[in-house]
Image (cartoon, helix red, strand yellow):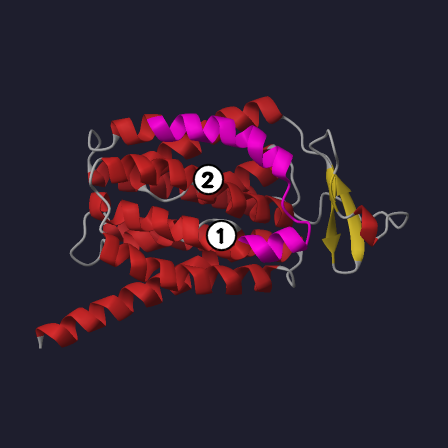
Amino acid sequence: LAAVTDLARDVLIIALAFVTSTVGSLGGLGGAILLVPLLTFGDMTIAEAAPLGLVSVIAGSVAAGRTQLRDGAVNHRFAVVTELGATAGVIVGVILAGSISDRVLTYFLATLALLAAGGGAIRKGVRWKPDPSLGADSIGEHHGSLSGVYRLNDQAVPYQPTRMGLGVSLMAIAGVVTGLAGVGGGFLKTPLSSEVMRLPAKVAAATSTFTIGLTASTALLLMAIDGRVVVSDSALVVIGSIVGGTLGSRLQRYLSPPVVRRATAIVLTVIAVVLVVRA
């Protein structure tokens, strides 16, 4: 009976990692924002589930990367600039971990998720329009600039991010959240990139999926040094997250920016509800 129970637990962890990573890669949220609360419905605390959430984010990011890079949806220069703020925030978050109660942290995450959902749901339409003069060879980021061109169906759409100073500062908050709760910060990074720095929704989602792996790696390393990583459970999460991240990134290419934005808002609202129920 104990063996059956252990097997069922392992299968459940893999299944949860698969589903949450698929959703996370689809919207650039990172599956951990769903996985961590779901794991705490069992016998895990946030402190125990946080490292598994980070493992999920890293595995999902690696799995999604191949498809998103091939599609030219990731803006590496934008990612590096914004990651400076996020990484600094991660270090602060890990240092503060344990000083904030699970209940307070859960309500804080739920509030941030609702704010991010509202920001994405309010805006209508598509901000950046296709340019008929651009061809397929224009797809990708521009050298020496944060601007670029992404593929929308069979059209090329140019874009130029703005308000970078404010955006990088707010990215530091996403980093703090990653260090505190192990949720990757993607549920904040994607809306910040799209609504504050005005990246196209699909580019914001793909770039966020890329950067949250970097942010999560920093936090996971610090947690490993602290002895908080359970290798056996982490291996199960990797299996589910790699498959889910691959599937989510492939589905993403077929969705329009408004659909990605609305889907992200809906998932963020669900996240907030899950967090409040968990609290």
Residue at disc 1, secondary structure: helix
Name which residue lies at 22% across and 31% down.
Answer: 100
Counting from the top left corner in percent of width and height, residue 127 is at 72, 43
Residue at the farthest right position: 133
Left or right of 94, for residue 165: right
Left or right of 271, for residue 159: right
Q: Please name whichever residue, 164 or 4, is drawn nearer the observer in this view of the structure.
A: 4
Few, some or many residues within 10 Å of mark 2 (<14, 14–19, 20+): many
Left or right of 56, for residue 186: right
Name which residue lies at 45% across and 54% down.
Answer: 60
Residue type indicated by callout 2: Leu
Residue at disc 2, secondary structure: helix
Q: How many marks?
A: 2
Name which residue lies at 85% across and 51% down.
Answer: 135
Res 21 quadrant in image: bottom left
Q: CA distance from mark 2 to mark 1?
A: 10 Å
Where does label 2 land, which residue? 214
Counting from the top left corner in percent of width and height, residue 6 is at 16, 69
Residue at the farthest left position: 1
Q: From this viewpoint, is residue 266 visible?
A: no
Counting from the top left corner in percent of width and height, residue 246 is at 51, 62
Counting from the top left corner in percent of width and height, residue 113 is at 42, 43
Name which residue lies at 42% across and 48% down.
Answer: 58
Q: Which residues are magenta?
A: 65-91
Where does label 1 land, which residue? 62
Q: Can residue 205 be found in the magenta stretch?
A: no
Q: Which mark, residue 239?
A: none
Residue type indicated by callout 1: Val
Q: Can residue 84 be found in the magenta stretch?
A: yes
Q: Mark 2 or 1 closer to N-term?
A: 1
Q: Quadrant of the N terminus?
A: bottom left
Q: Please name whichever residue, 8 or 29, is drawn nearer the observer in this view of the structure.
A: 8
